[in-house]
Image (cartoon, grey):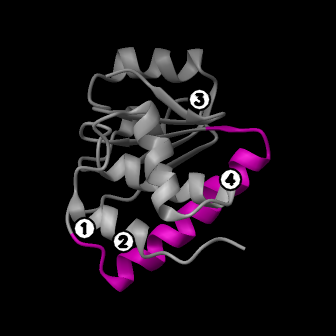
Amino acid sequence: MKLIEIIPGLFIRGDLTRVCRVAQELADRKIDVVVSLIKPKIQSIENHTDILSYIYMPIPDGKVPDELAKKLAMLTDYLVMHLRAGRNVSVNCQQGRNRASLVAALVVRLMEGVSGSEAIERVRAKRPNALANPHFVKFLEELPNVD
Protein backbone atom coordinates (compact mmCIF):
# COMPACT_ATOMS: atom_id res chain seq x y z
CA MET A 1 0.00 0.00 0.00
CA LYS A 2 1.27 3.45 -0.86
CA LEU A 3 1.13 6.53 1.30
CA ILE A 4 -2.25 8.27 1.17
CA GLU A 5 -2.30 11.99 1.96
CA ILE A 6 -5.29 12.82 4.17
CA ILE A 7 -4.57 16.53 4.65
CA PRO A 8 -1.41 18.38 3.61
CA GLY A 9 1.53 16.70 5.35
CA LEU A 10 -0.47 13.90 7.00
CA PHE A 11 -0.15 10.48 5.38
CA ILE A 12 -1.41 7.01 6.28
CA ARG A 13 -0.32 3.61 5.04
CA GLY A 14 -0.19 -0.01 5.98
CA ASP A 15 2.56 -2.59 6.05
CA LEU A 16 5.91 -1.16 7.06
CA THR A 17 7.53 -4.59 6.68
CA ARG A 18 8.71 -4.05 3.10
CA VAL A 19 11.38 -1.77 4.45
CA CYS A 20 13.40 -1.06 1.27
CA ARG A 21 10.38 0.19 -0.66
CA VAL A 22 8.91 1.98 2.36
CA ALA A 23 12.18 3.79 3.15
CA GLN A 24 12.38 5.11 -0.40
CA GLU A 25 8.76 6.25 -0.34
CA LEU A 26 9.28 8.00 3.01
CA ALA A 27 12.33 9.76 1.58
CA ASP A 28 10.48 10.72 -1.62
CA ARG A 29 7.63 12.28 0.39
CA LYS A 30 10.08 13.93 2.80
CA ILE A 31 8.48 12.27 5.83
CA ASP A 32 9.89 13.63 9.09
CA VAL A 33 7.81 11.71 11.64
CA VAL A 34 6.83 8.03 11.37
CA VAL A 35 4.29 6.46 13.71
CA SER A 36 3.91 2.67 13.88
CA LEU A 37 0.74 1.47 15.58
CA ILE A 38 1.42 -2.27 15.17
CA LYS A 39 3.97 -4.86 16.23
CA PRO A 40 6.77 -5.60 15.51
CA LYS A 41 8.96 -2.56 15.89
CA ILE A 42 10.73 -1.85 12.59
CA GLN A 43 14.34 -1.09 13.58
CA SER A 44 15.48 -0.12 10.11
CA ILE A 45 12.80 2.58 9.88
CA GLU A 46 13.77 3.90 13.30
CA ASN A 47 17.39 4.13 12.15
CA HIS A 48 16.56 5.83 8.84
CA THR A 49 18.75 8.91 8.79
CA ASP A 50 16.19 11.27 7.24
CA ILE A 51 13.53 10.63 9.88
CA LEU A 52 13.37 13.16 12.69
CA SER A 53 11.13 11.08 14.96
CA TYR A 54 9.96 7.44 15.04
CA ILE A 55 7.10 6.64 17.40
CA TYR A 56 6.32 3.04 18.22
CA MET A 57 2.91 2.82 19.89
CA PRO A 58 1.14 -0.44 19.09
CA ILE A 59 -2.59 -0.25 19.80
CA PRO A 60 -5.31 -2.89 19.53
CA ASP A 61 -7.84 -2.75 16.72
CA GLY A 62 -10.72 -2.86 19.18
CA LYS A 63 -12.29 -0.71 21.87
CA VAL A 64 -10.77 2.56 23.09
CA PRO A 65 -10.47 2.37 26.88
CA ASP A 66 -9.71 5.54 28.86
CA GLU A 67 -5.97 4.83 29.14
CA LEU A 68 -5.67 4.41 25.37
CA ALA A 69 -7.74 7.57 24.81
CA LYS A 70 -5.22 9.52 26.94
CA LYS A 71 -2.28 8.12 24.94
CA LEU A 72 -4.03 8.94 21.67
CA ALA A 73 -4.64 12.52 22.84
CA MET A 74 -0.93 12.96 23.62
CA LEU A 75 0.08 11.42 20.29
CA THR A 76 -2.40 13.63 18.43
CA ASP A 77 -1.06 16.78 20.09
CA TYR A 78 2.50 15.74 19.21
CA LEU A 79 1.63 15.13 15.56
CA VAL A 80 -0.33 18.38 15.26
CA MET A 81 2.70 20.23 16.64
CA HIS A 82 4.89 18.72 13.90
CA LEU A 83 2.35 19.39 11.15
CA ARG A 84 1.97 23.02 12.22
CA ALA A 85 5.77 23.30 12.07
CA GLY A 86 5.61 22.25 8.42
CA ARG A 87 6.78 18.67 8.90
CA ASN A 88 5.36 15.62 7.14
CA VAL A 89 3.93 12.76 9.19
CA SER A 90 3.22 9.14 8.25
CA VAL A 91 0.91 7.08 10.48
CA ASN A 92 1.09 3.35 9.85
CA CYS A 93 -0.78 0.20 10.84
CA GLN A 94 -1.37 -3.21 9.29
CA GLN A 95 -3.52 -1.99 6.38
CA GLY A 96 -3.86 1.76 6.91
CA ARG A 97 -7.55 1.17 7.46
CA ASN A 98 -8.47 1.36 11.15
CA ARG A 99 -5.69 2.31 13.57
CA ALA A 100 -3.86 4.71 11.24
CA SER A 101 -7.19 6.17 10.12
CA LEU A 102 -8.26 6.66 13.74
CA VAL A 103 -5.13 8.71 14.46
CA ALA A 104 -5.53 10.57 11.17
CA ALA A 105 -9.13 11.47 12.07
CA LEU A 106 -8.01 12.72 15.49
CA VAL A 107 -5.38 14.92 13.84
CA VAL A 108 -7.86 16.20 11.21
CA ARG A 109 -10.31 17.05 13.99
CA LEU A 110 -7.76 19.26 15.74
CA MET A 111 -6.06 20.72 12.66
CA GLU A 112 -9.30 21.66 10.94
CA GLY A 113 -11.52 22.30 13.96
CA VAL A 114 -14.20 19.82 12.90
CA SER A 115 -16.32 17.30 14.77
CA GLY A 116 -15.29 13.66 15.06
CA SER A 117 -18.00 12.74 12.54
CA GLU A 118 -16.71 15.29 10.03
CA ALA A 119 -13.15 14.04 10.58
CA ILE A 120 -14.34 10.51 9.75
CA GLU A 121 -15.89 11.77 6.52
CA ARG A 122 -12.70 13.61 5.55
CA VAL A 123 -10.52 10.54 6.14
CA ARG A 124 -12.95 8.33 4.22
CA ALA A 125 -12.92 10.79 1.32
CA LYS A 126 -9.24 9.92 0.84
CA ARG A 127 -9.36 6.28 2.07
CA PRO A 128 -12.88 5.02 1.26
CA ASN A 129 -12.81 1.83 3.34
CA ALA A 130 -11.28 3.52 6.40
CA LEU A 131 -12.58 3.19 9.93
CA ALA A 132 -14.50 -0.06 9.63
CA ASN A 133 -13.98 -0.62 13.37
CA PRO A 134 -17.29 0.46 14.98
CA HIS A 135 -15.56 1.14 18.33
CA PHE A 136 -13.25 3.67 16.69
CA VAL A 137 -16.17 5.31 14.89
CA LYS A 138 -18.18 5.58 18.12
CA PHE A 139 -15.15 7.00 19.96
CA LEU A 140 -14.69 9.69 17.30
CA GLU A 141 -18.39 10.54 17.07
CA GLU A 142 -18.62 11.02 20.85
CA LEU A 143 -15.69 13.44 21.10
CA PRO A 144 -16.63 17.01 22.01
CA ASN A 145 -16.39 19.65 19.32
CA VAL A 146 -13.10 21.49 19.03
CA ASP A 147 -13.22 25.10 20.21
Question: What is the x, y in percent for residue 87?
Answer: 71, 38
Closest to the camera, between mark 3 and mark 4, is 4
Are the residues tagged 2 and 3 within 8 Å (C-beta)? no
Residue drawn at point x = 45 percent, y = 35 percent: 125
The residue that disc 3 covers is 49
In this figure, which residue is indicated by the disc labeled 4?
112
Mark 3 or mark 4, earlier in chain: 3
- Separation (CA) of disc 3 from disc 4: 31 Å
Residue closer to the observer: 67 or 135: 135
- CB within 8 Å, label 2 to label 1: yes
Reply yes or no: does residue 78 show up in magenta. Answer: yes
Q: Which residue reaches farthest right? A: 85
Sequence-wise, which precedes: disc 3 or disc 1?
Answer: 3
What residue did someone put label 1 on?
Answer: 135
Left of 31 or right of it: where is 69? left
**Residue located beneath label 2 in the image:** 139
Query: Residue 20, percent across and down?
Result: 36, 16
The mark lying in front, picked from 2 and 3, is 2
Disc 4 to disc 2, C-alpha distance: 18 Å
Mark 2: give few (<14), some (14-19) or many (20+) Cα within 10 Å. Answer: some
Residue 71 visible: yes
